[in-house]
């Protein structure tokens, strides 16, 4: 019985070591050759500008890739490259109360992202990502803005990470 389990262990270990698809326990599927990622600042071209938004996206993406992959951050020309721009930052009414007053407002952030994979050009993409959060219309945006922006940026960074290196 002991030999059987030893044989199973060796076969499993050999199979895992033989895999070259860049498997990671975080779900990231990164080419084995890829060692670096470069993430550019996202210029803000939205009609309304949140001055901290570009830095928050940049920091969020760097943190996500450094904590969930073994890629090293490179200032430019990484094996994987992410660049983009902020295209929309807006707030609008999202629901009306029974008395025809605005009940909730919606903060929406949209970014356009370009992803380049030097080892697998089929994985390249250019796409817009948009996320929103609703908030009580009786509140001033400035009172809830920081928290909403943090939540939206986290979701956008997850979307970009999943689209670029997670093949579900």
Image (spheres, rainbow, N blue to C red):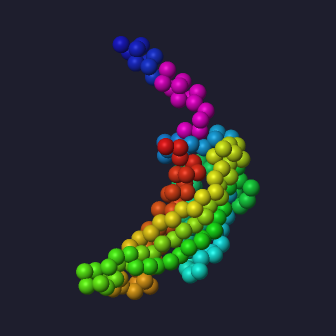
Residue 54, how many percent across, how many down? 60, 72
Q: Which residues are magenta?
A: 10-23
Q: Name the spot of residue 121 as percent of width and height, x first.
A: 69, 45
Predominant SS along the magenta part: helix
Quick check: 28 above or below 147? above
Going 62% across and 61% down the picture, which residue do you hit? 113
78 in relation to 112, above or below: above
**Image quarter (top left, top right, bottom left or bottom right) of the N terminus:** top left
**Residue 88 position in % (x across, y down):** 56, 73
Locate residue 60, reporting x and y percent. Answer: 54, 64
Residue at the image position 64 percent from the left and 64 percent from the top: 84
- The structure residue drawn at horizontal position 68% and vertical position 52%, both measured from the top left corner, is 116
Q: For this view, does 18 lie left or right of residue 1?
A: right
**Looking at the rendering, which quadrant does residue 33 occupy?**
top right
Q: Nearer the viewer, residue 96 or 141?
A: 96
Q: Is residue 55 left or right of residue 141?
A: right
Left or right placement of residue 18 versus residue 118 in this view: left
- Kindly tell me whether residue 120 is visible in this rendering: yes
Magenta stretch contains residue 22: yes
Question: Going by the picture, which residue comes out furthest to the right?
Answer: 77
Residue 52, placed above or below residue 138: above
Of residues 84 and 151, which is closer to you in this image?
A: 84
Please say whether residue 136 is visible from this viewpoint: no
């Amino acid at each position: 019985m002991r030999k059987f389990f030893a044989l199973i262990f060796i076969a499993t270990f050999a199979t895992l070591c033989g895999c070259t698809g860049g498997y990671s326990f975080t779900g990231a599927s990164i080419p084995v050759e890829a060692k670096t990622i470069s993430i550019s600042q996202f210029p803000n071209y939205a009609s309304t500008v949140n001055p901290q938004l570009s830095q928050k996206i940049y920091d969020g993406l760097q943190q996500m890739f450094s904590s969930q992959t073994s890629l090293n951050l490179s200032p430019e020309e990484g094996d994987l490259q992410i660049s983009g721009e902020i295209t929309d930052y807006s707030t609008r009414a999202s629901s009306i109360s029974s008395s025809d007053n605005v009940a909730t407002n919606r903060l929406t952030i949209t970014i356009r992202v370009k992803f380049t994979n030097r080892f697998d050009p089929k994985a390249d993409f250019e796409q817009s990502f948009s996320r929103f959060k609703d908030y009580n219309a009786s509140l001033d945006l400035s009172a809830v803005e920081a928290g909403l922006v943090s939540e939206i940026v986290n979701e956008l960074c997850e979307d970009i990470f999943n689209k670029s290196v997670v093949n579900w």
